[in-house]
Amino acid sequence: MKKKSLCIDFYEVEDLTELSGEDRELLEAAKEMTSNAYAPYSEFYVGSAILLENGKVVKGSNQENAAYPSGICAERVTIFSASAQYPDVVMKTIAVAARNPRQAMDYPISPCGSCRQVLLEFELKQKNPIKILLTGETGKVYIIEKAIDLTPISFSSDDLKRLLS
Ligand SMILES: [Zn+2]
């Protein structure tokens, strides 16, 4: 047996003036979108915004349901909306922000496993990295340069091709 290790680089930004204007605007859009969340059950409000290569910004928020599994995270609302409206346009950057009225969110929120899988799917489809910006209501920002970094040892369409061949 061989022990293997993974090392993932990401950036932690405390001074937000170090971010580009484009990234700051996208984070602001994600924070604003937390107000559009429909989250009566969790009261966990998540907003997301994606900058496309054509300059358009697609926004989304989490949408819950009394039948809990029928709800969907902000990231997937935004990614699917971007893909539905602009199927052939590269997604450059996604920003994700969260707000929890019961607890100050002064640290970056991180996508769930399903959203990581969906991010990876579209990164592989478009053959271009999707940069991920993560924040809370306040505090530092994490920058992950590509979706594969959040989903190492992942399942993808290549595995399906192997299964079918
Ligand atoms: Zn999710």
Image (cartoon, rainbow, N blue to C red):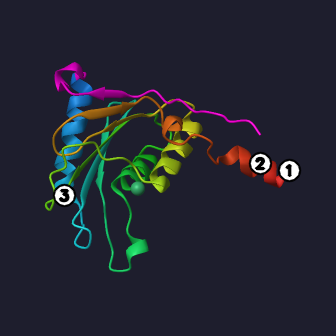
> Counting other residues with Cα less than 10 Å from the Cα at mark 3, is it few (<14), some (14-19), or many (20 or more)?
some
Task: Confirm or deny contact between disc 1 and disc 3 (CB under 8 A).
Answer: no
Asked if the magenta segment contains residue 6, the reply would be: yes
Residue sitting at the far right:
165
Q: Is residue 155 left or right of residue 134?
A: right
**Residue bearing mark 1:** 165
The amino acid type found where label 3 is placed reads Asn
Tell me the SS state at disc 3: loop
Residue annotated with mark 3: 100
Ligand 1 quarter of the rendering: bottom left
Residue 96 in the image, given as x and y percentages of width and height:
30, 44
Q: Distance between the Cα atoms at labels 1 and 2? A: 6 Å
Residue 49 pos. (x, y %):
30, 43
Residue annotated with mark 2:
161
Q: Image check: 156 left or right of 162?
A: left
Label 3 close to label 2 by CB (< 8 Å): no
Q: Which residues are magenta?
A: 1-20
The residue depicted at 25 percent of the width and 35 percent of the height is 26
* Quarter-of-image position of residue 53: top left
Where is 123 relative to 18, above or below? Answer: below
User: Do callouts 1 and 2 mark residues in contact (Cβ within 8 Å)?
Assistant: yes
Q: In this rendered view, identify the residue nearer to me: 23 or 55.
A: 23
Question: Is 92 or 143 nearer to us in this picture?
Answer: 143
Q: Earlier in the sequence, mark 1 or mark 3?
A: 3
Mark 1 falls on what kind of element?
loop
